[in-house]
Image (cartoon, rainbow, N blue to C red):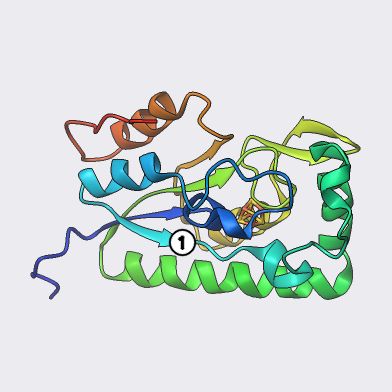
Amino acid sequence: MFNDGRSKKVVFIAHCFLNQNSISDGTAIYPSAFRSLIDYFLSANIGIVQLPCPELFCLGLDRGDIHGADRSVVVENTRIRSEMKSKIHNVELIKLADYVVQQILEYKKHNFEIVGIIGANRSPTCGVDTTSNDNAEVNGMGLFINEISDQLSRENISIPMIGLKGNENIQEKLDQLLCQKTIVNNPKITI
Ligand code: SF4
């Protein structure tokens, strides 16, 4: 089964890396997407799965406050974190994490290789190594990545996760991710 043209390798990537138009006001770096990230995985024949953007889904494009961009990023992120933790949004966030984990389980069931999950460091929602809390960038996961991680643990599934913040150490981090997998000749990032 699936002995066709596909590579049977996929990576899950935070929504805003592929669609900068979704990100909170004042934080987009590129007009459309992190092209280098897309090129990197396409060069390695790895399919790209775009994670949902929980903040867009729960709070809207303006995150519920049209003045968000007037604050510093970590202050605004702390406000967003607090909104995302409210009961109503937390229910939605868990549903979105369920949707992601269902996809992962389906790929695993058919022995596809899940290369990793790439989150957005400093985000209150999608951070992997760092997130925002108490008006600062702090160590720890964002709410959405944390929920995905918990659900995967309950399923006894381990998938490498990395967090990117802009283009900081991007080549090094992506190479580390691919080196853990059966992929040779890591592509080169062009920024
Ligand atoms: S980091 Fe996550 S929640 Fe924030 S804009 Fe990107 S995808 Fe949306």
Q: Is residue 85 above or below residue 87?
A: above
Q: How many marks?
A: 1
Q: Position of residue 98 (x, y in %)?
A: 58, 72
Q: Residue visible at 77% across and 74% down?
A: 91
Q: Label 1 neighbourhood size at 10 Å, few (<14), some (14-19), many (20+)?
A: some
Q: Amino acid at mark 1?
A: Gln
Q: Nearer the viewer, residue 21 or 183?
A: 21
Q: Position of residue 66 (x, y in %)?
A: 86, 60
Is 45 displayed left or right of 159 in the figure? left
Q: Does any atom of ligand 1 lie closer than 8 Å to the CB of label 1?
A: no
Q: Is residue 57 above or below residue 7?
A: below
Q: Residue 48 falls in which quadrant of the image?
A: bottom left
Q: Is residue 63 above or below residue 177?
A: below
Which residue of the protein is positioned furthest toward the front in this rendering? 31
Q: Position of residue 150 (x, y in %)?
A: 63, 56
Q: Which corner quadrant holds the C terminus? A: top left
Q: Is residue 146 above or below residue 87?
A: above
- Residue that numbered label 1 is attached to: 50
Ligand 1 lies in quarter: bottom right
Is 153 displayed left or right of 45 in the figure? right
Is 163 displayed left or right of 183 in the figure? right
Q: Nearer the viewer, residue 10 or 20?
A: 20
Q: Residue visible at 38% across and 35% down?
A: 177
Q: Residue 80 falls in which quadrant of the image?
A: bottom right
Q: Position of residue 123 (x, y in %)?
A: 70, 45
Q: Residue visible at 35% across and 48% down?
A: 38
Q: Which corner quadrant holds the N terminus? A: bottom left
Q: Residue visible at 47% across and 54% down?
A: 18
